[in-house]
Image (cartoon, helix red, strand yellow):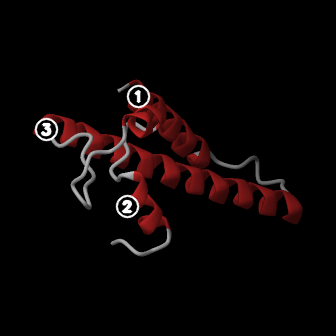
Amino acid sequence: MAKREETVERYESDVSSSLRPSSDGMEDMVDRATTNYNRELTFAISDGERALLEQIDSALARLEDGTFGECVNCKTGIGELRLEAVPWAANCIDCQELQERGLLD
């Protein structure tokens, strides 16, 4: 829950800072390009934070329905050390490797 709250705060901060007007309109072309790049970077980071929130919420749902610690793909147990490192992990190590290689849906 602490990681979820931290991520929500960071996400909201990123979104609000990206929506602020860039300046007084006196930027040159390089300044505008830099501002646009920074805004795009902020949105990319925000997308990553949103994905992390979805993973945390999914883990909390699995905790509620009694399937937390079970791989969502192969239904075997997820290792304790893995869950300590990444408590929102949905896959065991083997299935995670398959997913990273694009071999899982």
Mark-to-mark CA distance, 2 and 3: 20 Å
Q: Counting residues from the N terminus, which is met first, the one under dot 3 or under dot 1? A: 1
Q: Residue 5 carries which label?
A: 1
Relative height, residue 84 to residue 71 (above, below)? above
Relative height, residue 11 to residue 50 (above, below)? above
Query: How far across and how far down the image is residue 3, in percent?
Result: 44, 30
Q: Name the residue type under label 1.
A: Glu
Q: What element carries label 3?
A: loop
Q: From the viewer's side, name the closer residue of 101 and 50.
A: 101
Query: How far across and how far down the image is residue 7, in percent?
Result: 47, 35
Q: What element carries label 2?
A: helix
Q: Quadrant of the C terminus?
A: bottom left
In the picture, measured across the screen, residue 100 lies left or right of residue 36, that is left
Q: Name the residue type under label 2.
A: Cys
Query: How far across and how far down the image is residue 69, in percent?
Result: 27, 41
Q: Counting residues from the N terminus, which is met first, the one under dot 2 or under dot 3? A: 3
Q: From the viewer's side, name the closer residue of 87 and 81.
A: 81
Q: Counting residues from the N terminus, which is met first, the one under dot 1 or under dot 2? A: 1
- Residue beneath disc 2: 95
Mark-to-mark CA distance, 1 and 2: 28 Å
